[in-house]
Image (tube, helix red, strand yellow):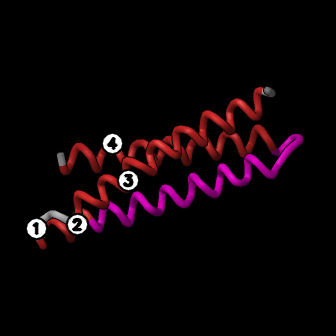
Amino acid sequence: MTDRQAYIDKLKAKLDEWNADVDKFEAKAQSASADAQVKYHEQLAHLREKQSEASARLHELRSEGGSAWEEIKEGASRAADALGEALKKAKEKFE
């Protein structure tokens, strides 16, 4: 396995884990009070935006090669980190 493929696999696994966490967060929002649901849904919108960005970067990583790889890798890392940080803040806020 190449370093590139290993990185892609690692990033995919991390995003899958975080996507499951977002789904759990969404399920928790469904059972919250009406006032809390508004706050949950605001956080969920932010998390879904970060999820979408990270997924798009992962797709770019899979399809790009050559010299663009390092640049795209950096962007993917930033997107994944942003999703992880947003999820962490959401958990801290609501747990």
Rendered location of residue 51, percent (x, y): 50, 56
| Residue located at (40% from left, 43% from top) | 85
- What is the C-alpha distance between the residues marked 2 and 1? 8 Å
Rendered location of residue 70, percent (x, y): 76, 38
Disc nearer the start of the sequence (4/2): 2
Does the segment drawn in magenta span residue 63?
yes
Span highlighted in magenta in the image: 41-68
Contact flag, marks 2 and 3 (Cβ < 8 Å) = no
Q: What element carries label 2?
A: helix
Tag nearer the camera, 4 or 3: 3
Residue located beneath label 2 in the image:
30
| Residue 25 placement: quadrant | bottom left
Contact flag, marks 1 and 3 (Cβ < 8 Å) = no
Contact flag, marks 2 and 1 (Cβ < 8 Å) = no
Horizontal side of residue 87 vs 28, given as left or right:
right
Rate crowding at label 3 as few (under 14), some (14 to 19) or many (20 or more) other CA atoms within 10 Å.
Answer: many
Q: Is mark 1 on a helix, strand or loop?
A: loop
Q: Residue 22 carries which label?
A: 3
Disc nearer the start of the sequence (4/1): 1
Please, what is the three-letter code of the amino acid marked with disc 2?
A: Gln
Residue located beneath label 4 in the image:
88
Q: Which of 55 and 93 is in front in this view?
A: 55
Q: Which mark is residue 33?
A: 1
Q: Residue furthest right?
A: 66
Q: How many labels does the image show?
A: 4
Rendered location of residue 4, percent (x, y): 76, 33
Tag nearer the camera, 4 or 1: 1
Please, what is the three-letter code of the amino acid marked with disc 3?
A: Val
| Residue located at (40% from left, 57% from top) | 47
| Residue located at (55% from left, 48% from top) | 79
